[in-house]
Image: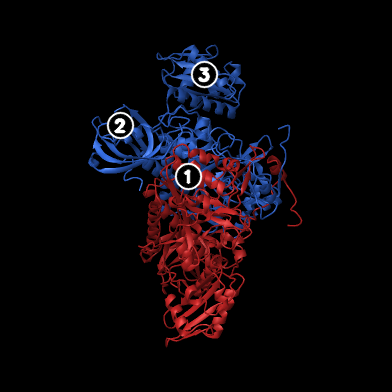
Chain colours: A red, B blue
């Protein structure tokens, strides 16, 4: 029995009790005749006290030799503090130590174990076990555990069955790259780690499980962009005998439950927006609707007025930035520089100041009258004192650029309330997207997504125009999940693989098991997956997922703490019938 | 909206309601003028009825063309049945069909979708999605989901934090073989899939998480014995600032909770037995204590009486088989044949019948008097009418043989009550076991297990005698879990690696991160892992784990449904800098 209480437990009511505590030495204040020690564990901090008057001399000496992060066990009596600390729940008491056992020593930690540490990212990752001792990281992990329990309990209560799908499956190199696992027992063959349990959850629906969920690791061997992980966690769900509406309702329920239980936020409305509307109004398929600044298209108002730049383009589109009509030349120039950055890629930016007196001042006054600009302002729902910003060019690219500018302004102007949660369904995604590099269609969600029945007739003639029964849930400008109604008959599935450029043989070799299953009474079904890492980070009010993962990998896919990946032995390679070739020189 | 109710929902109270149902055609009884259809889903079966009098002719015709496992949607009115079926909850009603939509057809299934199917194992695995439609398999998976929810809720309530540990880690070829994962981004290097999250959960303790749990997939590339899977699931736990007693108490609590909630069985006692006692009393470290037949050692009574076979051996040991004193020669011969089978490996078996009149008849009457045999009977706690069975030979081997015989008799005589759950802790396992093949010590549990402090002095002189703070939970003769108090200081851990034959460099390269962590204030800690697949099977009253796994692999580690593992493309291999060599001819 190392302890009678945790370090967050003791209160005034415990005064005079003899207690045993264990934990880490957070801090020592040594006044010579008197020592205070902050003893820390997961549950809190308790102040220990030893002094020349009440403490045995040898014991006092022992306490003086403690160092930061030493692990100790103490026994002693709870006493009331003279000067109380109302910042911690145990701040009314301290423990007068009568016995002290050093359970383990500690070298000086490479960074401070404080809420704000002096350790850089790489160092914190290398000593992640020390980083986890810091309250913010620890609380993030505890928060994640709380979220997953809420998810599981909600879905279980709703009749979803938690089914584990296999991790050693077959490689289907569509979309991202698979991680593969050589099989020793099946020479020369490989398993793959799942990018998602997609086909298995569909087979569970064919198998009559009706409602399935799983919180499950998924794997993608991608070149890692910032804040992506090669292994990540999904809340994965599937339902049979459902239409899109049933699924949206089910997961509005889950999201509403989480926001209420975890954040104490009540959200009633889950607005819906088509993909087309989202892109045309916000320049992105994951708009942050916590603030306005909707796009207004100005082609009819701005073209053919003599301004060549606008006349020659596909789209002229703008936003009204609230209350920024007073911007100086320097400030508007900064915005122009921003959109011209290669990451954004615009050629320029037209600005119009809507003055408080109702007049306009713009960078294109030469071409447009006050009446023209007033029409623009009206189109953009601008008010006096606003700043109108207009981009022009190729429609798709210009919308994306304006979307980026919109988010940049929201950040600069603090328009996003971190306490607000604004979920949104984006629906009616295109089924396919054209890839210029490979000159073929890719599935926008994945090859199992069902086309909208009313667009089926376009599948041969104009496949790019076919919309899918696919939907994303967007929360505060982040895609937290997505899903679709699935194809559930062999013919459509086979046609889909044709469209995606599979030969019949390839389709059969990779997905034959699924198409065969569709021939034995597959029910209509659909589902959805939430990205847990991202969801937890957003609910936790943070931008990066890394500190919600206990042992994350860096941008090269390495675990710098355990130093993985690493070489394996010759014997292991031989058993697997593998030879590692030297990397090619030109790489 | 495919349905207004599930197929298990409708009762007499619903009579006269218009309902919509969806599901699979389980059975059609076509009487010509009248058709009954059993419509099935996860929730139950509802009887549909159509007849010439009340049903539109085209509709009746359509129904006649349905086949088994067709997926249909029907609308109709709930009516009271004339002849009720009290075997199913919906047996009081049927639905008079007014509308029928075939959602999907089905080819004739390769086996019957019934509780007792005509499908063989291989076929059932190949069409697992059809197998899952069968009630016993479906109910097993639902049962598993229920068990995991209970585990999670119990442990969460007890303050355990669910933390996900990584799946892409480093290969540490100690114990079983690792599955490895080539890294594309780190050329020539490999990740490994975890055999367990052992080191990570220990690092979480070093990190102050205090109480951790996870239900997690683990991976072992072993030659598969029957009823083993290359990927399996563990309930994994770890606690800090604990002694063995704290851990045993925590997991008695969990097991008690599960037995109560899942099985409605109240278990108070969790007896404890040392490894030594278990082996000496039952010939195994996982004794089934639902029945008696404890071993009695007879060396002092049976040796030096002229029976050479006994005189020359290390151990003479027997059991009393209740009520089998009447066995015929044929029956005792069968037992002798049993122990002589190569799988058991005994040279022979001595029997003594304890007759109802108090006399004895034995196969060694030539050497032993009635008084001698009476002493044996007393030692084995035999009663009149029992059969005494005695084996002799090398102590370790003979105990194992007698243990196998004991279980064989329990099976034959039906001594194991399947409704009874008898958990047991086996404690004080040896730290090390000697491996004759490699001529070195192996860790009996794993290299992180702490030696008992009182045995530390034997670590250099007689390492084989050192006992560990290691324990297994045994339930009805199955090891359902095991764990230990861990080493938490660098010096002992390093010494342990020495004992196991690691060079300093190997130990540092593979486990340096853990030993380094121990230098920064590691707390005393320990833990335990339950095998979920086995636990669920035992709670479900079944012997094999395979039907509690949605998509199991066969004994060659293959998923015959998706046909994995499989070859991967040349491009994939090239990206991974790998070449597959031809299997060696002599393999």
Q: Which mark is residue B87?
A: 2
Please identify the quadrant where the C terminus of chain A is shown: bottom right
B547 shown above or below A265: above
**Which is more toward the observer, B379 or A479?**
A479
Q: CA distance from mark 3 to mark 2?
A: 44 Å
Q: State yes or no: discs 1 and 3 in contact (Cβ < 8 Å).
A: no
**Numbered disc 3: secondary structure:** helix
Name the residue located 31 percent from the left edge and 31 percent from the top edge: B36
- Residue B175 in percent (x, y) is at 62, 42
Identify residue for label 3: B335
User: Left of B558 or right of it: where is B581?
Assistant: right
* Chain under callout 3: B
Q: Is residue A363 above or below residue B355?
A: below
Spatial CA span between label 1 and label 2: 31 Å
Real-space CA distance between mark 1 and mark 3, rounded to the nearest whole angstrom? 51 Å
Foreground pick, A168 / A465: A465
Q: Position of residue B188 (x, y in %)?
A: 70, 51
Q: How many C-alpha atoms fall within 10 Å of the one at disc 3: few (<14), some, or many (≥20)?
A: some
Q: Secondary structure at mark 1?
A: helix
Q: Kindly give the residue lying farthest to the right in the view shown.
A: A585
Instruction: Tell me, for residue A422, which label it has, or none.
Output: none
Q: Nearer the viewer, mark 1 or mark 3?
A: 1
* Residue shown at 62% from the left, 64% from the top: A122
Looking at the rendered image, the disc whose residue lies closer to the viewer, 1 or 2, is: 1
Is B136 situated left or right of B85 in this image?
Answer: right
Residue beneath disc 1: A202
Is B241 on the left or on the right of B57, as rendered? right
- Between B473 and A544, the one nearer to me in the picture: A544
What x and y, as percent, mark residue A516? 51, 38
Q: Quadrant of residue A439?
A: bottom right
Pointer 1 local density, CA inside 10 Å: few below 14, some 14–19, many at least 20: many
């Amino acid at each position: 029995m190392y302890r009678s209480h945790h370090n967050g437990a003791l209160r005034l009511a415990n005064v005079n009790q003899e207690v045993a505590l264990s934990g880490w030495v957070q801090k020592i204040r040594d006044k010579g005749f008197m020592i205070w020690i902050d003893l820390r564990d997961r549950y809190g901090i308790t102040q220990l006290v030893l002094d020349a008057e009440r403490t045995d001399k040898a014991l006092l000496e022992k306490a003086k030799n403690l160092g930061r992060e030493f692990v100790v066990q103490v026994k002693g009596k709870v006493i009331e503090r003279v000067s109380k600390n109302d910042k911690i729940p145990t701040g009314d008491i301290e423990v007068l130590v009568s016995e002290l056992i050093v359970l383990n020593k500690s070298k000086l930690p490479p960074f401070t174990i404080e809420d704000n540490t002096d350790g850089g990212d790489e160092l914190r990752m290398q000593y992640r076990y020390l980083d986890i001792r810091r309250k913010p990281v620890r609380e993030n992990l505890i928060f994640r555990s709380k979220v997953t329990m809420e998810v599981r309990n909600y879905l279980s209560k709703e009749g979803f069955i938690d089914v584990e799908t296999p991790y050693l499956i077959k490689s289907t190199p569509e979309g991202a790259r698979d991680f593969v696992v050589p099989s020793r027992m099946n020479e020369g063959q490989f398993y793959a780690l799942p990018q998602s349990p997609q086909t298995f959850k569909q087979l569970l629906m064919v198998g009559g499980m009706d409602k399935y969920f799983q919180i499950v690791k998924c794997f993608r061997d991608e070149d890692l962009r910032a804040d992506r992980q090669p292994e990540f966690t999904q809340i994965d769900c599937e339902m049979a005998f459902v239409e899109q509406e049933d699924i949206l309702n089910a997961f509005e329920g889950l999201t509403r439950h989480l926001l209420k239980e975890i954040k104490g936020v009540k959200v009633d409305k889950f607005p819906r927006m088509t993909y087309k509307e989202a892109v045309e109004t916000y320049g992105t398929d994951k708009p942050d609707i916590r603030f306005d600044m909707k796009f207004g298209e100005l082609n009819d108002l701005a073209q053919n007025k003599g301004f060549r730049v606008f006349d020659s383009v596909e789209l002229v589109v703008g936003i009204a930035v609230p209350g920024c009509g007073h911007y100086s030349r320097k400030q508007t120039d900064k915005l122009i520089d921003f959109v011209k950055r290669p990451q954004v890629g615009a050629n320029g930016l037209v600005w119009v100041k809507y003055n408080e007196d109702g007049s306009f001042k713009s960078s294109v006054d030469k071409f447009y009258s006050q009446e023209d600009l007033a029409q623009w302002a009206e189109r953009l729902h601008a008010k006096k004192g606003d700043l109108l910003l207009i981009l022009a060019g190729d429609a798709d690219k210009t919308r994306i650029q304006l979307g980026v500018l919109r988010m940049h302004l929201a950040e600069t102007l603090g328009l996003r309330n971190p306490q607000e949660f604004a979920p949104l369904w984006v629906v009616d995604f295109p089924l396919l997207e054209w890839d210029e590099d490979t000159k073929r269609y890719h599935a926008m969600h994945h090859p199992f997504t069902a086309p909208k029945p009313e667009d089926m007739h376009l599948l041969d003639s104009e496949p790019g125009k076919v919309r899918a029964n696919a939907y994303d849930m967007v929360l505060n400008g982040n895609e937290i999940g997505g899903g679709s109604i699935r194809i559930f008959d062999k013919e459509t599935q086979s046609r889909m693989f044709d469209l995606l450029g599979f030969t019949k043989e390839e389709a059969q070799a990779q997905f034959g098991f699924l198409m065969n299953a569709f021939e034995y009474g597959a029910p209509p079904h659909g589902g959805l997956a939430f990205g847990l890492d991202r969801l937890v980070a957003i609910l936790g009010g943070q931008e990066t997922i890394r500190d919600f993962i206990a042992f994350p990998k860096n941008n090269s896919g390495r675990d710098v703490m355990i130093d993985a990946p690493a070489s394996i032995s010759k014997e292991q390679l031989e058993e697997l019938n593998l030879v590692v070739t030297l990397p090619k020189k030109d790489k």
